[in-house]
Image (spheres, rainbow, N blue to C red):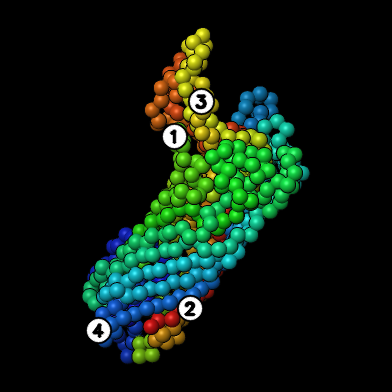
């Protein structure tokens, strides 16, 4: 049996399609065209050693374009008129975030055995552009909207990051069809798979397209300054890091993680329609050369990337196909729902905050406390900063609140013959509003003693947890936090597949 892999991934699944439903091979009217043996694109798996077709390879080449737009707001501590009571509002408009990505997608599906295939993907970012534009006159109020400590401003409006490009990652996976409706008409087609994503490109580094300093007087400020380059002059604040400061850092393009995705999906052909369901989950683990290494501290509740889980349901309509000529036209409509857990991530403000020269973000935090050596004040202040501990530098990675996303996508597939097919599609995704700077000052789940708790103590002096070195008051305190609202993602893709 010839089968083909879908150029898009589809997820993990909740199978439950009725086995008593009519199947594609049931008696048909004389006016109905004969059908192909392959299921919908979602559940196709390349074969090998099947009947008279001992080996199959499918090669895909495509182009993807995506655009993300979101309104960025900031909380403000204000007083209710006439009450004198302080409270937190989220109504200060910072600006509109715009991100556009053009990507070349390459994929190879190699049949290993019947209903068992090796999948190799290599996405290449041709151009990634990010910017924050002024909105509702926010540029004129930037000193207030983007205020840090007294007298400093976190970044300028408008803000623009340099264009990024390069290899994103290498994905290697296995797909297996545990059930196949063609082989057993009373069962649906059920596919499970796993994929590993390996970081190939330079990890992302926070950068600004401008080298003009805002809060510092250093001449020749660097657009992609190292986190330990406090004055943005190319000199490390710690001697141990000087070897990593040769010239400007590259903006990078990859997420700096190793990913593991598991997925499963199922479909059932009923005459000219084929409904399907599925799900996928993505786990990411930071690599040692990414900026996550600067955020991995004891006392930080969230050090790693968020977990992502997606469920989907869709319907493929096949209005025309001719089995003898291996030709088919199909239309696909899909709904998706995604959950993103809380975690440290590259937010819409990653470049703007990470490339800031504001002292409140540039100067490092202390990572450890020790017992107060002054016996006279030790009772009131049992622990003090350990000056010999390593410093925690801010990279732009922030703790992002959990949120969800809902998407709809449609696709058109034309199989022109036995050896080639074309895909054209688009999608729209709405992302739930969420905080993008939401770190906590203390890790209340960590064990602490009076000598290590630092300021994380109760009114009676009992230790509550460990201080969080990644916490930055000017962006993480209620009344200063940033959030994203009205986020929309628009995607378009076009690809061709050659089937040998």
In the picture provided, is 427 more to the left or to the right than 154? Answer: left
C-alpha separation, residue under disc 4 versus residue under disc 1: 58 Å
Q: CA distance from mark 2 to mark 4?
A: 26 Å
Q: Nearer the viewer, mark 1 or mark 3?
A: 3
Q: Return the mark for residue 298.
A: 1
> Dot 2: within a 10 Å radius of its alpha carbon, few (fewer than 14), some, or many (20 or more) residues?
some
Q: What is the crowding at mark 4: few (fewer than 14 residues within 10 Å), some, or many (at least 20)? A: few
Badge 3, how many Cα within 10 Å: few under 14, some, many 20+? some
Tell me which numbered mark, 4 or 1, is placed earlier along the sequence: 4
Secondary structure found at label 4: loop
Give the spatial CA distance, label 3 vs label 4.
71 Å
Percent position of residue 451, x then y: 44, 20
What residue sits right under mark 4 in the picture?
51
Gap in angstroms between the C-alphas marked 1 and 3: 14 Å
Cα gap from disc 3 to disc 2, whole angstroms: 60 Å
x then y, percent, for residue 291: 52, 47
Task: Give whichever of 256, 86 is nearer the camera.
Answer: 256
């Amino acid at each position: 049996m010839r089968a083909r892999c879908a150029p898009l991934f589809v997820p993990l699944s909740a199978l439950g399609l009725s086995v008593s439903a009519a199947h594609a091979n049931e008696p048909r009217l004389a006016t109905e065209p004969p059908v192909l043996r392959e299921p919908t694109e979602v559940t196709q798996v390349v074969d090998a050693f099947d009947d008279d077709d001992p080996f199959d390879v499918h090669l895909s080449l495509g182009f993807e374009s995506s655009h993300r737009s979101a309104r960025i707001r900031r909380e403000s501590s204000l007083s209710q008129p006439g009450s004198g009571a302080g409270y937190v509002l989220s109504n200060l408009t910072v600006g509109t975030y715009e991100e556009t990505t053009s990507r070349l997608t390459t994929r190879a599906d190699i049949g290993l055995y019947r209903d068992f295939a090796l999948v190799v993907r290599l996405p290449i970012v041709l151009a990634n552009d990010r910017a924050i534009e002024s909105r509702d006159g926010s540029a004129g109020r930037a000193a207030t909207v983007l205020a840090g400590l007294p007298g400093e401003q976190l970044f300028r409006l408008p803000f623009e990051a340099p264009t990024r490009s390069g290899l994103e990652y290498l994905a290697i996976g296995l797909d297996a069809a545990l059930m196949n409706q063609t082989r057993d008409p009373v069962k649906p087609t059920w596919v499970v798979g796993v994929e590993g994503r390996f970081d190939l490109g330079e990890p992302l580094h926070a950068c600004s397209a401008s080298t003009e300093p805002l809060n510092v007087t250093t001449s020749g400020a660097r657009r992609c300054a190292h986190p330990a380059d406090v004055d943005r002059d190319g000199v490390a604040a710690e001697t141990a890091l000087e070897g990593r400061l040769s010239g400007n850092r590259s903006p990078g393009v990859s997420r700096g993680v190793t990913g593991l995705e598991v997925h499963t999906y199922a479909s059932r052909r009923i005459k000219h329609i084929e409904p399907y369901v599925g799900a996928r989950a993505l786990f990411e683990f930071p690599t040692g050369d990414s900026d996550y290494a600067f955020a991995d501290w004891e006392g930080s509740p969230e050090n790693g990337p968020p977990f992502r889980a997606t469920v989907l349901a869709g319907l493929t309509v096949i209005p025309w196909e001719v089995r003898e000529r291996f030709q088919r036209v199909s239309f696909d409509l899909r709904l998706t729902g995604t959950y993103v857990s809380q975690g440290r991530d590259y937010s819409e403000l990653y470049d703007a905050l990470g490339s800031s020269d504001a002292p409140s973000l540039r100067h490092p935090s202390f990572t450890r406390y020790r017992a107060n050596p002054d016996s006279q004040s030790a009772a009131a202040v049992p622990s003090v900063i350990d000056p010999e501990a390593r410093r925690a530098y801010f990279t732009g990675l922030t703790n992002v609140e959990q949120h969800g996303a809902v998407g709809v996508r449609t696709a058109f597939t034309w199989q022109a013959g036995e050896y080639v097919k074309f895909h054209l599609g688009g999608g729209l995704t709405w992302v739930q509003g969420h905080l993008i700077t939401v770190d906590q000052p203390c890790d209340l789940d960590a064990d602490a003693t009076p000598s290590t708790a630092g300021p994380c103590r109760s009114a009676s002096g009992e230790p509550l947890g460990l201080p969080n070195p990644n916490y930055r008051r000017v962006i993480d305190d209620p009344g200063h936090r940033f959030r994203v609202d009205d986020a929309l993602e628009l995607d378009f893709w076009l690809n061709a597949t050659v089937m040998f």
